């Protein structure tokens, strides 16, 4: 069969301009199987995105532990918060300039698409997504927004005893107290979002047999066709992150 094929791997869509038999249609609509001998390894996640993910994981853990210990550990709480802010600034820019699967446009979809994805979450035969699926994409955005709120409120927070955010004098005492309350309450929102994220990863690992952890470490997924590998643009990423670090330093010094 002669056919011209155009593939958009991020949306998991394939448009085929040809005259097909019913047998051809059945083959195209068959869900991809991990046991299919035609599966190939493709690089989905670029190095900067993977480094962001795991550095953020470590820094959030440090912030949570140090914040609960208090006292002298608050020095590490604040430093990890500054580093998280730099990472978030980097990720925001990278969401527009990074490789295709790292861009927000690749996984931020309309509500109808998210609902359709959620409705099929327990369907083991659901065709996989090369990057984040629509439901996972919005959960990522929710977590990034909550992290921005957490570090942003922390800059103005004060416990009136030992620890003060570097920008607490920029606002009134009432505003500082309000943002301190936001900082304390939002940590529970973060805990819930992180717990949901971990549950989703384990759900896909054990129920759907899709190892999302491994792909976020190696950057590689098995896919049913060759696609353009994620272009890391490592030098650009390093420059963006360096500028983010400088901006945070100038802000809090």
Image (cartoon, rainbow, N blue to C red):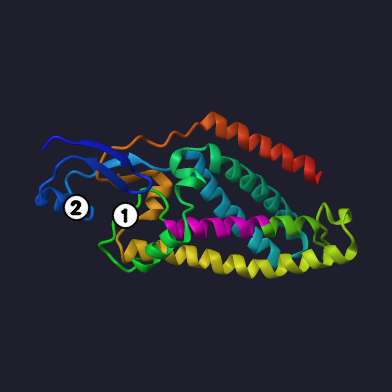
Q: In which quadrant is the N terminus drawn?
A: top left
Q: Earlier in the sequence, mark 2 or mark 1?
A: 2
Q: Which mark is residue 171?
A: none
Mark 1, secondary structure of its residue: loop
**Residue assigned mark 1:** 128
Residue at x 35% of width, y 52% of height: 129
Residue 150 in percent (x, y) is at 68, 59
Residue 84 in percent (x, y) is at 64, 50
Pick the front one: 120 or 18: 18
Residue at x 54% of width, y 46% of height: 52
Left or right: where 68 falls relative to 190: right
Q: In which quadrant is the C terminus drawn?
A: top right
Q: Quadrant of residue 212?
A: bottom left
Can residue 101 be found in the magenta stretch? Answer: no
Residue at x 67% of width, y 39% of height: 244
Q: In this view of the protein, can residue 50 be seen by the observer?
A: no
**Residue assigned mark 2:** 35
Residue 145 in percent (x, y) is at 62, 57
Q: Quadrant of residue 33?
A: bottom left
Can residue 144 be found in the magenta stretch? Answer: yes
Left or right: where 165 falls relative to 227: right
Front disc: 2 or 1? 1
Pick the front one: 106 or 16: 16
Badge 1 crowding class, 10 Å Cα cut-off, few under 14, some 14 to 19, many 20 or more, is some
Q: Quadrant of residue 65?
A: bottom right
Pick the front one: 163 or 104: 104
Q: Which residues are magenta?
A: 134-148
Left or right: where 137 falls relative to 36: right
């Amino acid at each position: 069969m002669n056919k011209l094929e155009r593939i958009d791997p991020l949306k998991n869509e394939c448009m085929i301009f040809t005259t097909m038999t019913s047998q051809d249609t059945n083959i195209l609509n068959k869900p991809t199987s991990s046991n299919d001998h035609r599966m190939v390894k493709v690089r989905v996640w670029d190095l900067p995105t993977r480094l962001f993910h795991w550095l953020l994981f470590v820094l959030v853990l440090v912030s949570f532990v140090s914040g609960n210990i208090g006292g002298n550990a608050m020095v590490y709480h604040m430093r990890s918060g500054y580093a998280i802010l730099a990472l978030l600034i980097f990720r925001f820019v990278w969401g527009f300039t990074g490789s295709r699967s790292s861009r927000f446009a690749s996984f931020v979809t309309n509500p109808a698409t998210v609902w359709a994805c959620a409705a099929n979450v327990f369907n083991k035969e659901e065709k996989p997504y090369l990057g984040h699926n629509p439901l996972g994409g919005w959960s990522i955005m929710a977590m990034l927004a909550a992290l921005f709120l957490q570090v942003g409120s922390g800059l103005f927070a004060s416990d009136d005893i030992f620890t003060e955010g570097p920008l607490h004098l920029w606002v009134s005492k009432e505003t500082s107290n309000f943002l301190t309350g936001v900082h304390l309450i939002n940590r529970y929102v973060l805990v819930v979002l992180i717990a949901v994220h971990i549950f989703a990863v384990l759900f896909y690992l054990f129920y759907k047999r899709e190892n999302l952890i491994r792909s976020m470490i190696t950057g590689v997924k098995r896919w049913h066709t060759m696609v353009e590998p994620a272009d890391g643009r490592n030098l650009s990423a390093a420059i963006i992150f360096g500028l983010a670090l400088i901006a945070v330093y100038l802000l809090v010094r």
